[in-house]
Image (cartoon, helix red, strand yellow):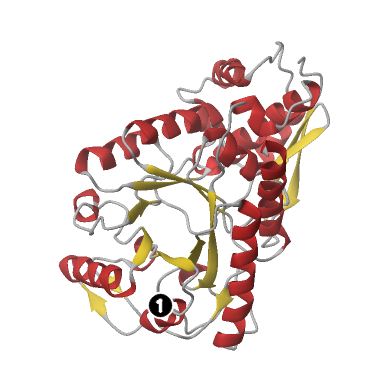
Amino acid sequence: MIIKEISAKIIKDSRGEDTIEVSVNRIKASSPSGKSKGAHETPSYHSSLEWNVNYLNSLAIPFEIKSFPDLGKVEDFLKEKNHLKDVKEFGANALFALESAILKALAKEQKKELWQIINAKVHSLPTPVGNAIGGGLHSHQEDHPTFQEFLIIPREKKAKKNVEVMKEIHKKLGKVLKSKSLNDEGAWETEKNEEEILEILMEFKEVNIGVDVAASSFYDKSYEYQSKELNRDAQIAYINSLISEYNILYLEDPLEEEDFEGFSKIRKKNLVVGDDLTATQIERLKQAIKHKSINAMIIKPNQNGSLLELKEIFDICRKNKITTILSHRSGETMDDALADYAVGFGADYIKCGIATPWREAKLNRLIEIEKQIN
């Protein structure tokens, strides 16, 4: 494929905030934007969103793209032209949108699905992880749970059935909570505390329970809850007690993002997941492996930017038996490629919410891919 035309523009994400859309040969891709950001994730743009848009609108890439590894040519070109030590200095949102648009255009030219450009031999699909009840930085209410996300994880074998189960329980939870508002990710808002929510989720036997603690968001020398304050040891003890009492399958960011050693003390009964801890960065992942901090990892394309590096992260996780979860961001677009990347890279789970059009687009694409594979 010859890249004949590149253009970029500013669009609005699901929160009404600015993000980037890139077109390659008139095929569009866009990047989401995160609200709860880890300190170690790649900056979204080189110097500004406007800089990246203007640069891409004047860019010509003078070579042919034949396959996924040819993204290396694009990254080398961007580094040389902009005198970058690392291509991620170009900005994660802009780089991801550009590379995604290139792969989409390549897939169209080769009459393939996007996931096939990465991996033509797919035999299984990722299990969806759905944010059902929200708190933390994603909440619009003054009184809200300190933990950021309460997740439901279905146990069905088929993607379509998993999505149906999540949607059904999401509706039921709205009635149980008597909630009338959804947060940025389409999760129900509530004034209930952590234990009250977990008690409610325990009633739904057809799903496993997950929690994104997002501990860095309420850490300042100690963990500051709405009704209590815990030191490091007390936080570890509290989290471990919740895992046991509520049989939590999935536990994300239970401690602040620099505490690799503390993470290693969280009971690995099920999945202890790094997000802010690892920030989709290879060096952070290697530190987590060294300290035995995690056995699962959130991977967010626009936390890194490079799809080539994303593949390397998946490979490292696979080699070290670390479960992979490809994830959306709180500020999403209607781009559904996350499902293709989850399938193509072989993610164990895909975390993309349950409700609202921006989340449903990814789930519907996952169902569509299931039909293609079968």
Most extreme residue toward the right is: 26
Question: In screen coordinates, is 89 left or right of 368?
Answer: left
Question: In screen coordinates, is 108 left or right of 290?
Answer: right
Q: Is residue 245 above or below residue 58?
A: below
Give me the residue at 31% from left, 66% from top: 219
| Amino acid at pointer 1 | Leu
* Image location of residue 357, percent across then percent down: 73, 61
Is residue 150 visible in the rendered structure shown here?
A: no
Is residue 334 visible in the rendered structure shown here?
A: yes
**Nearer to me, 68 or 258:** 68
Secondary structure category for the residue under label 1: helix
Q: Image quarter for residue 115?
A: top right
Give me the residue at 42% from left, 51% from top: 38
Give me the residue at 33% from left, 69% from top: 247
Q: Is residue 351 above or below residue 73?
A: below
* Image location of residue 267, percent across then percent down: 23, 59
Give me the residue at 32% from left, 85% from top: 227
The N terminus appears in which quarter of the rendering?
A: top right
Most extreme residue toward the top is: 63
Most extreme residue toward the left is: 233
Question: In screen coordinates, is 25 left or right of 20?
Answer: right
* Image location of residue 205, percent across then percent down: 46, 73
Q: Mark 1 points at which residue?
A: 198
The C terminus appears in which quarter of the rendering?
A: top right
Using a 10 Å C-alpha cutoff, classify the residue at mark 1 as few (fewer than 14 neighbours), some (14 to 19) or many (20 or more).
Answer: many
**Nearer to me, 268 or 299:** 268
* Image location of residue 370, percent across then percent down: 67, 44
Count of labels shown? 1
